[in-house]
Amino acid sequence: MLRAAVLGATGYLGGELLRVLSQHPSLDVVLATSGRQAGATLGSVYPGLSRFSELVLSADADRADADVAFLALPATESMAVVPSLLERGIRVVDLGPDYRLKDPAEFRRVYGKPHADPGHLAEAVYGLPELGRDAIRSARLVANPGCYPTATLLAVAPLWRAGLVEGPIVVDAKSGTSGAGASPTPTSHHPEAAGTVWPYGTPEHRHLPEMRQALASAAAPAPPIVFVPHLVPLVRGILCSIYVRSTGPFDPLAFASVYARSYADSPFVRVGGVPRLPWAAGTNRCFLSVVSVGGAPVIFSALDNLGKGGATQAIQNANLLLGLEETLGLTQPGFAV
Amino acid sequence: MLRAAVLGATGYLGGELLRVLSQHPSLDVVLATSGRQAGATLGSVYPGLSRFSELVLSADADRADADVAFLALPATESMAVVPSLLERGIRVVDLGPDYRLKDPAEFRRVYGKPHADPGHLAEAVYGLPELGRDAIRSARLVANPGCYPTATLLAVAPLWRAGLVEGPIVVDAKSGTSGAGASPTPTSHHPEAAGTVWPYGTPEHRHLPEMRQALASAAAPAPPIVFVPHLVPLVRGILCSIYVRSTGPFDPLAFASVYARSYADSPFVRVGGVPRLPWAAGTNRCFLSVVSVGGAPVIFSALDNLGKGGATQAIQNANLLLGLEETLGLTQPGFAV
Amino acid sequence: MLRAAVLGATGYLGGELLRVLSQHPSLDVVLATSGRQAGATLGSVYPGLSRFSELVLSADADRADADVAFLALPATESMAVVPSLLERGIRVVDLGPDYRLKDPAEFRRVYGKPHADPGHLAEAVYGLPELGRDAIRSARLVANPGCYPTATLLAVAPLWRAGLVEGPIVVDAKSGTSGAGASPTPTSHHPEAAGTVWPYGTPEHRHLPEMRQALASAAAPAPPIVFVPHLVPLVRGILCSIYVRSTGPFDPLAFASVYARSYADSPFVRVGGVPRLPWAAGTNRCFLSVVSVGGAPVIFSALDNLGKGGATQAIQNANLLLGLEETLGLTQPGFAV
Amino acid sequence: MLRAAVLGATGYLGGELLRVLSQHPSLDVVLATSGRQAGATLGSVYPGLSRFSELVLSADADRADADVAFLALPATESMAVVPSLLERGIRVVDLGPDYRLKDPAEFRRVYGKPHADPGHLAEAVYGLPELGRDAIRSARLVANPGCYPTATLLAVAPLWRAGLVEGPIVVDAKSGTSGAGASPTPTSHHPEAAGTVWPYGTPEHRHLPEMRQALASAAAPAPPIVFVPHLVPLVRGILCSIYVRSTGPFDPLAFASVYARSYADSPFVRVGGVPRLPWAAGTNRCFLSVVSVGGAPVIFSALDNLGKGGATQAIQNANLLLGLEETLGLTQPGFAV
């Protein structure tokens, strides 16, 4: 049994990590931290949990002795603890944004602070296994992608790399409210959120630079992306409706064929008909669908923002890091309804 | 045109007061106050409003010169401003709880503070017009009932007074989340509230003493009431399912006949089939229905917590206070869906 | 008092017509028809209604004697009754699609039937008052626009006519489920609809030709439009997120200035910050907002599909047809929540 | 590997059976039937499923060769197929109501048809393991309880048997809409169901006789139960608020102590604070909580109507029937949100 630590165990991503890890055959949670609820048992915080329910929440990770640490901390907090974790030989999967943007200046522009750990930033590997799992296998530090970039990149990157699409790419995302985190805010107050669809993140959502970075390459910059996230009255799930331009005459079969090739060895990505969000709930799956709307290509990408968009992808990355089978502990099916 | 002031104009009850008053033919809003948003126009706070949109929110009511003041303030704040308003000759409809409980000791027990204005407390009239509108017509100060007591008392009081039912009375209430107010809390955080039915208010909800007081009389104490409110994933509306015991063999027609007699002159109370909450949305109506479940009487009572359970009932009280037609400005129909 | 008939009074648009007409000072409903519920009173079908509640539903409109008839019938049913209504001197506002597309061949392509009344089709006026109310004033037959075209055209037409935008225009629409009508279907089954965002209407929604026709002119064809409607778990309301390309450098103020000019005399269109759907609920209002997302223009357009997207717009058209004040009976404000 | 058949695989209970069985280490689904979708693969019907996705749906169970059959059929359909299954040596867990009521006359009264298989009715064992698992272990035919009886009986039966409570017992149940099944109806039409709380099942819900039977014994009849189910705008989950009368002075600790004794060996029943429905989603757990409301006992019981209220309880029964560990394949945790 390998040992895992979960830092930030009482946020929604932390809770989902514990939930899924409780089904993992090769990982044991030996430490869980929480600023606000230190001293409580996991069972009292998460009565739906079975395994780990006797574990007592710690205030910090100073005593962490683990094979891997999952960091589910607010933005700009991970970079303060990663150096010490790595020094102690603990591999890290950071679910926050601190190690996603390779350019420290860009990080500063987006997150409003200078990067405190530029050395490890350079070393960190972007953890979207389906777009490149080899680098993850040998990494010490993985930057787990954001929920919106995961949904968008799985849909767009193979087509963009294959030269089938060009910009501008319009990404109209609809997200459940759990993506906004466990702290009450006016936007996520039930009477406000339950009765509308709320576009936000203008003029630029923090996840956009991450998408651009992932699509750019030595050969070419990323295409222009117009990204507008919307809160919808759901708790879990993201559906991205993605409007691209075909570089040649649009052939849905050509798109499907690129997906088939790209994801032949990626069991968590499924290509088919228009997806429903319950299929993805609590899972590490992303469902893609290509349709023609008046002759133009539209792609739907669906996942659970707490699952493939967060906690389960982090576990997938940890499996790779630790030399385990990539799908270990991640085979639970979604719901029909 | 009579002049109205709305104190606490940026909470949900304040907003609903302004919305409905904007359709009132004889009342003009000349003052609206807000602690947090003083200086803003009503139109910027409520873009859905037409009339009054140029009115600028004041920080307080010191300059209030009005025929009637609606107080939509947090518990224990009204009693600090009522004396000064009455002194200036302004009639008051208090939507908060400060003047509902006649016994200052009971007020202190429930709200944790001594009553600051016991003199006016004695004078205040409980504003449930359908159970006694004469006293309201000649009052200076009306205590507008709570949302749950309104729904419960309209269903229970006539039967109790007629001797048709006895206790214990079980009131299982289901409420939309707007009843909890405009300030974000963990309970009303969308990811928490949208996925469950949440019983709260144990061991005793603050509205219970108000129900007991209204059912008690010189002749007899109130029956025991077991009251459990539940938050349901809706924004507006309360459905109370009320389980009573018939003092004799249960005859639904006898119940209906008591309602018919009691509410013959009360157009806002409607008795019929099982109600749907949209019928009441934005209105001053309460829908009652009596059914037999295995031979036992069950009563459903439905209203809009922001309407008959709050703002529109306050306007009904103001109409009475000011010698206007009781239904003035309150005839808007509910929704089918 | 002018007399109105409502044909198809027991669908959602019919119910909304009756609800709003019950507040209209100059229109009386003298006839309401329903295939399924003929013989019932309106009060029994709509317990939330006050006025008209004694009116008995008729099976058909044969005896219609009215100044105006509102037709809220399924697609392809209006064209069978319009000739007879017009012959009897009754003006018609058709809320269905039968008279929207001017080209009978296009009608046949989209609705799968030849047009049964091509003569009146040529005469019918497209009833979007804010884009041209003069023709409506002198019309006998008005084709009330679809809900999606209303939301889209109010946002796009002024900009397109002013030469500020070019195609392709991406319209990502999010709609409550009441737009799908009152008949249960698998798509609108609560367990299916409540847990997902459901894109539909591919490869071409029936409302697209209507949008194209309205944007085309003698001088130029319409721009390409990629239109994807999505069902979201709400009952009422449409939010369209509209992605356009600016013909020159994008200046939000220039867009706002075109709206200001175009809608100076149109009190139902409001331009401002990002809209919330409750503001529009039950009203005839459309809220527009222009934002810059990474330098690109994005427009949000919000309305109630049963209101400005249907029933209230039909009443606005009837007001114009009958020489009444355009806003008569349509001034009710929306909700804050 | 033991072999299972799922009859009625395309309803919501059938889908949930397949979802959970796909995680079961000792059961393989070898046959799945569907009237409407015979010929389709399970993967095309349930894209969220992994295992079994190649299995093709059969029209009927004639060829069934299995160790256990799960029957998720409409009421009165199971009794037509059970005799043949038992004859072929197949053990049966019937998720429908056909074998729940021991008295054929009562069955006829409630379901409107004479019982077609009274012999096996006498033999059938009521499958609520926590209230008596020994009889299940040796049964050939198990009648899986209804969702409401499961939630109610787990809360009430131990207290009733211990003599702590007396009637009348008021059960106010709030259920998600998936309990109404996969076929669209007006009641479960999203625009109708999403905006209200809908009490139904009056004057007597079909599940009431089942509750009465389970509480009655040789020594005494069941207490009177007033049972009112309500649809709430959720998909999965039941919360029962249960109002009982304490036979002596109410002591919450005495109630908790009865639960602790009764469920010491029942890991799926958890007693604690007020439960949230996501904790139970997709699981076989039932959460109980006892509170004092004004001195009176109120019990909350929460489960997933498709889980412990249906499919997972059926698998628990099958585990017992087949001599497997009771919890096998049923340890997945619920959600925090």
Image (tube, coloured by chain):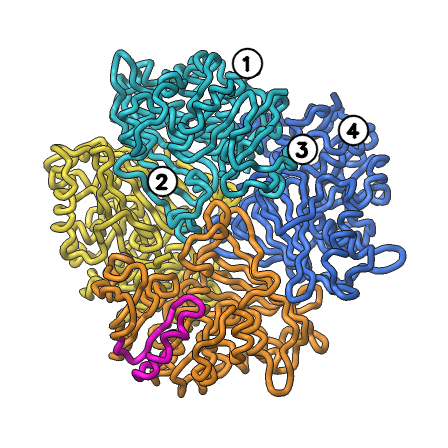
Chain colours: A yellow, B blue, C cyan, D orange
Question: Observer-nearest residue: B30 or A206?
Answer: B30
Marks 4/1 in contact by CB < 8 Å: the verdict is: no
The chain holding disc 3 is B
Expressed as whole percent of the image width and height from the top left, the position of residue B273 reads: 63, 50
Find the distance from the CA under tag 2 to the CA under tag 3.
35 Å
Three-letter code for the amino acid on which mark 2 is drawn: His
The chain holding disc 4 is B
Q: Earlier in the sequence, mark 2 or mark 1?
A: 2
Which-is-in-front pick, marks 1 and 3?
A: 1
Q: Is residue D313 left or right of residue A108?
A: right
Three-letter code for the amino acid on which mark 4 is drawn: Leu
The chain holding disc 2 is C
Q: SS for tag 2?
A: strand
Tags 2 and 3 on a common chain: no
Which-is-in-front pick, marks 4 and 3?
A: 3
For label 2, the residue is C230
Quarter of the figure with residue B116: top right
Three-letter code for the amino acid on which mark 1 is drawn: Gly
For label 4, the residue is B324
- Residue under the image location 44 percent in, 40 percent down: C181
For label 1, the residue is C323
Tags 2 and 4 on a common chain: no
Q: SS for tag 3?
A: loop
For label 3, the residue is B331
Quarter of the figure with residue C51: top right
Question: Observer-nearest residue: C93 or C12?
Answer: C93
Marks 2/3 in contact by CB < 8 Å: the verdict is: no
As drawn, A291 above or below C259: below
Find the distance from the CA under tag 4 to the CA under tag 1.
33 Å
Quarter of the picture containing the N terminus of chain C is top right
